[in-house]
Image: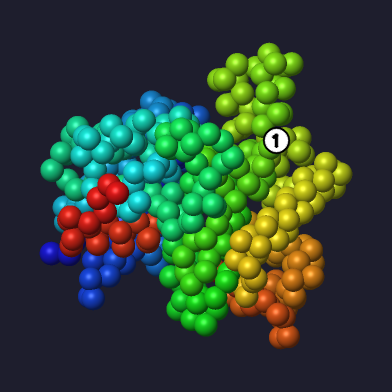
């Protein structure tokens, strides 16, 4: 009987799931994937087999998915109709591992308690990441659960990259730059090693451009620097988050605008970024189609910041050999890639127009000093690999 691994990526309004079977060579292979979207508003269950065949597509009564916990019950009930073997384990994406967790770890009540202390560092993500873990621990305590952290891949940074210029006592308390989207970067590093082994051994910047955005500097496949810091607010402008922001702006909002911590948190996570700049939408597809000058401003600012952060990361690498676009915008918006390349022509980035329009995978022009790739990310596969590794080596992934 084949082993089966369920991967869960739980957000504030959606639960993404993917089922993997462990086949020949001990490799996890996707069997099907799906999600419940619109939780608490207009929930909908969608699932497709690996072949693309639709398995489910139905709008749910609101009471069946009023919150993450009730929606998770729907996912489990649907899985029971599709599974012909019991689950071997569940792998979870957990955004923040803090300073303690430097690798995936099997979750028990003690690990969960530690992860709950990190909720203030990722208030938009962490509570939802932990909700299904808590639910499975309560109802199925013998089922192995593996937490895979978006911060862990960046623990190879040097101390200078992770420090803020603040007193030592705060560093010791864990106030430092962590970096995020690590599961995506880890997958891209492994995939680049297959596609372009020579480049993978060099100095590469990966741009994870989606609703959440960040960039990572890789040297020999290891993270050297990232644009995100203490929380997932820092760095590039995102769909609804501002990215890099002078701390004085936060003080001004508290003092002059009368915001309290809760309203400020909502503002920074939900009302800024492309949505705030454009006043229209956080969806790049809508902004690209719009003739409103505010849409152009938002996209121009976004491209400017991607180019600016490239220079910063190239300085950390002391040079640059290649560049990778990934995630929703990076994989699907050739206009944005072209605009970024235009701003980075000084670094020797030149795109092949036809390859860029087709989505690559190699989109740099002959003679470009930088090799430029478009590589679709697969965080769920990375989680499945880590989960399987811990099932095989149950003592690894411990707290550092």
Q: From this view, report whether residue 49 is shown above or below residue 69.
A: below
Residue 159, horizontal then vertical, whole percent: 49, 52
Q: Nearer the viewer, residue 163 or 64?
A: 163
Residue 335 appears in view = no
Residue 31 lies left or right of residue 122; in this view the side is left
* Colouring used for the render: rainbow
Mark 1: few/some/many CA within 10 Å (<14, 14-19, 20+): few
Residue 297 lies left or right of residue 274; in this view the side is right
Residue 392 lies left or right of residue 367; in this view the side is left
| Rendered-image quadrant of the N terminus | bottom left
Residue located farthest toward the top when viewing the structure as drawn: 258
Q: Quadrant of residue 98?
A: top left
Q: Nearer the viewer, residue 96 or 284?
A: 96
Taking the spot 26% from the left edge, 54% from the top edge, the residue there is 397
Secondary structure under the numbered disc 1 in the rendered image: loop
Residue 120, horizontal then vertical, whole percent: 46, 29
Q: Nearer the viewer, residue 121 or 3?
A: 121
Residue located farthest toward the front when viewing the structure as drawn: 168
Taking the spot 53% from the left edge, 65% from the top edge, the residue there is 218
Q: Report the residue marked by disc 1.
A: 246
Taking the spot 65% from the left edge, 48% from the top edge, the residue there is 236
Taking the spot 20% from the left edge, 39% from the top edge, the residue there is 108
Q: Nearer the viewer, residue 138 or 123?
A: 123
């Amino acid at each position: 009987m084949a082993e089966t691994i369920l991967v869960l990526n739980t957000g504030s309004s959606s639960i993404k799931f993917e089922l993997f079977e462990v086949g020949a060579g001990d490799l996890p292979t996707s069997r099907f994937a799906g999600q419940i979207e619109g939780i608490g508003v207009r929930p909908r269950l969608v699932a497709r087999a690996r072949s693309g065949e639709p398995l489910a597509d139905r709008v749910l009564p609101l009471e069946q998915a009023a919150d993450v916990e009730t929606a998770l019950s729907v996912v489990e009930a649907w899985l029971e109709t599709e599974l012909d073997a019991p689950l071997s384990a569940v792998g979870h994406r957990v955004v923040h591992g803090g300073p303690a967790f430097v690798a995936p770890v099997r979750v028990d009540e003690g690990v969960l308690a530690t992860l709950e202390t990190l909720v203030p560092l990722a208030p938009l993500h962490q509570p939802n990441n932990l909700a299904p873990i808590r639910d499975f621990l309560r109802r199925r305590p013998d089922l192995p659960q593996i937490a895979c952290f978006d911060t862990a891949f960046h623990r190879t940074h040097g101390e200078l990259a992770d420090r803020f210029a603040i007193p030592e006592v705060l560093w010791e308390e864990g106030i430092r730059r962590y970096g995020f989207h690590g599961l995506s970067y880890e997958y891209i590093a492994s995939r680049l090693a297959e596609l372009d082994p020579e480049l993978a051994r060099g100095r590469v910047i990966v741009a994870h451009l989606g609703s959440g955005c960040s960039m990572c500097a890789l040297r020999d496949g290891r993270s050297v620097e990232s644009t995100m810091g203490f929380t997932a607010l820092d760095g590039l402008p995102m769909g609804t988050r501002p990215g890099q922001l002078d701390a004085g702006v936060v003080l001004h909002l508290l003092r002059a605008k009368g915001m309290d911590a809760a309203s400020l948190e909502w503002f920074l996570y939900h009302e800024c970024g492309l949505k705030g700049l454009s006043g229209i939408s956080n969806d790049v597809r809508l902004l690209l189609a719009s003739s409103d000058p505010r849409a152009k401003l938002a996209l121009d600012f976004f491209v400017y910041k991607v180019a600016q952060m490239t220079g910063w990361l190239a300085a950390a690498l002391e040079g640059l050999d290649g560049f990778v676009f990934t995630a929703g915008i990076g994989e699907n918006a050739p206009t944005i890639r072209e605009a970024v390349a235009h701003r980075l022509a000084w670094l020797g980035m030149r795109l092949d127009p036809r390859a860029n329009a087709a989505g690559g995978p190699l989109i740099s022009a002959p003679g470009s000093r930088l090799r430029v790739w478009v590589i679709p990310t697969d965080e769920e596969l990375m989680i499945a690999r880590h989960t399987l590794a811990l099932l095989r080596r149950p003592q690894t992934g411990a707290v550092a």
